[in-house]
Amino acid sequence: QVQLVESGGGLVQAGDSLRLSCAASGRTYLVMSWFRQAPGKEREFVAGISGSGGSTMYADSVKGRFTISRDKARNTLYLQMNSLEPEDTAVYYCAADAHQTVLVVRAHRAYEYWGQGTQVTVSS
């Protein structure tokens, strides 16, 4: 079993930065990812990282602006978000894939464990 708790969301202006954190307890070294969901839209993949932290994957919409990382000693996942845009406004969720330690999968249905979400709002 894995418990995930996100933090770090907030209201910022376009061009600002935020760092999201996801504290994990339970099984470690699983593939973990960030997803987001805006009102009226489907949940979408943002970024993912392998259990070792050696492999990452990003959605095209955030590539070059967002960085995913993990601190294995603290069992914490991060998402550094720079140059934020109004289109980044959404509830952000961290998720863990119970079946993978290496391969990052973009489909949200592959992830068994989810945090409660943290709101990110970017004003123009």
Image: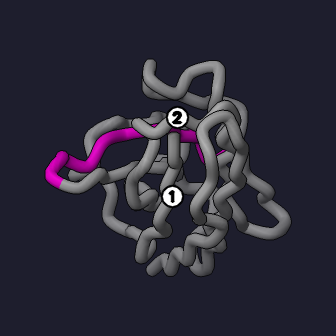
Residue sitting at 60 percent across and 38 percent down? 14
Colour scheme in use: one colour
Question: Which residue is identified by label 2?
Answer: 85
The magenta span reads: 40-52
Quadrant holding the N terminus: bottom left
Q: Tell which residue pokes out farthest to the right in this image.
A: 73
* Image label count: 2
| Residue 15 falls inside the magenta stretch | no
Type of amino acid under label 1: Val
Mark 1 Cα-neighbour bin, 10 Å: few <14, some 14–19, many ≥20: many
Q: Is residue 80 left or right of residue 109?
A: right
Q: Secondary structure at mark 1?
A: strand
Distance from disc 2 to disc 1, alpha carbons, whole Å, reads 11 Å
Residue occupying image coordinates x 50% and y 80%: 3
Residue 52 location in percent, x, y? 70, 43
Q: Which residue is mark 1?
A: 120
Q: Relative to residue 123, is residue 61 depicted above or below? A: above
Residue 8 lies in what quarter of the image?
bottom right
State the SS at label 2.
Answer: loop
Residue at point 33% right, 56% down?
Answer: 111
Type of amino acid under label 2: Glu
Residue 6: percent from left, percent from top: 57, 71
